[in-house]
Amino acid sequence: MTKHFTFNYGIRYEKTFVPQPTIVNPDFPATGRIPSPNKDFAPRVSLSYSLGNRTVLRAGYGIFYARLHGNMLDTLFLGNGKYQTAISLNNTQAGGPVFNGVLPSATGLPTGAITLNVADPNFHAPYTQQGTLAIEHQLTRDLALTASYIWTRGIGLYVQRDLNLGPPTSQLYTYIVQDAAGNNVNSFTTPLYIAANKVDPRYSKILQVENGGQSWYNALAIQLEKRMSHGLSAQIAYTWSHAIDDGNEQGASNNISNTFLNSTYNGNYGFDKGTSTLDQRHRLSINWLWAPRFTTSTSALARYFVNGWQLTAITTLASAHPVSPTINGPSTALGAEFPGIQLAQNTITGAGGWNRVPFLPVGFLNIDQIYDVDARITRSLPFSERVKANLSFEAFNVFNTIHNTGVQQAAYSVTGNILKPVLTNGVSLLGTGSASQGFPDGTNARRMQVAVRFNF
């Protein structure tokens, strides 16, 4: 029995250079500075250990830093209320236009109309810690089985906090939850962010980009691989995984825009900890390639008709991605418990952040399961030693099993302090399909194509 041990390590230091804004809002000096970390410490280590002639143990760990998105830097440069002003108005603000009204100029705007964007004083590039532990065993000469544990921890992910909201009310407000028949079935009590508590009433939102988000990913991956022999190769891969985050991470463009507030309660990211929108608990992939050689003859009949065929297929079976049910925005006036008081923003908490149903778990709805088969048949045409052609026919989603990529998420609407189910013709469509998008044609319906490729 032969044993081999391999160990690799490395340390990487990264410096992030960030150009600084040249235009500063004198009301908020923070609009003139974007922190630029000097060093990002990124160690990586890996090892492999042979447990005999057929089994190998592998492990690895590393820290990896993300780049600072150009779109985010652009938002911070332009979001100072001076260089390029973002204005948000509604007809409840003094001097705000009503429908079909036109502002004669940008001067004399109602107070609380301009949104600012600033970077947190401790702002830095987010990073992940990633680790794997795998064992690989060769079952036969051309068949190998690998089992891997995969772990990823995201730290300091981009989120935004509204510095202008001020503290929530100490007195709680109660919403009554009704069913489709109008019966009171539940209640939800919450503090509120109100307009009267704004820190600086001259501005609407003052969004601070900060590193308050976190993510967790754990996965078990099993792979059975048959290497090419007798004209056949195949691979079966199954992954069980669970992705969790606490920052409503739906993609970088959301988290760095000038209006997106990640949390239900301003800065309370732990309240929104739950299954990520990119979570997919189960995924099975089966792919194979068959390139038979029916005869050893080199005749024209064998070269152009009998041999040279190749058939491949990829089958994907996957569980659904989750989404969270939402509440349509309420009017800004509160009920009898807070007479004459206005919410700061258009959500039931007044925070203007994530409008999910706060008394249901994050990721409460499933979009749709996936069953998809893609296949290709290829014919090789060797015209000469230097000139060859491949004729292929491809079908994507062979069995036309269309799956939803979006569902109806609106669960409730607000009237006063009543949360009513959103109904269409008296029926709730919550969780029903609303989109079936797919690349590259905008649909995931069956598509077929024929192609010819010449090599010379």
Image (spheres, helix red, strand yellow):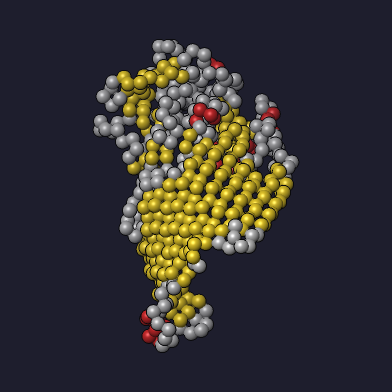
- The answer to whether 155 appears left or right of 442 in the picture is right
- The answer to whether 354 appears left or right of 409 in the picture is right
Up/down of 33 relative to 43, above or below:
above
| Res 379 seen here | no
Residue 272 rendering spot, x and y as whole percentages? 50, 30
Nearest to the observer: residue 241 or residue 40: 241
- The answer to whether 157 appears left or right of 432 in the picture is right
Q: Quadrant of the N terminus?
A: bottom right
Nearest to the observer: residue 273 or residue 45: 45
Up/down of 387 relative to 353, above or below:
below
Identify the residue at image location x=43%, y=84%. 296
Residue 159 rendering spot, x and y as whole percentages? 57, 34
The quadrant in which residue 331 appears is top left
Judged from this view, the residue extending furthest toward the right is: 38
Up/down of 163 relative to 369, above or below:
above
| Res 52 seen here | yes
Nearest to the observer: residue 290 or residue 6: 6
Residue 284 rendering spot, x and y as whole percentages? 42, 53
Residue 446 rendering spot, x and y as whole percentages? 34, 58
Judged from this view, the residue extending furthest toward the front is: 1
Identify the residue at image location x=35%, y=55%. 445
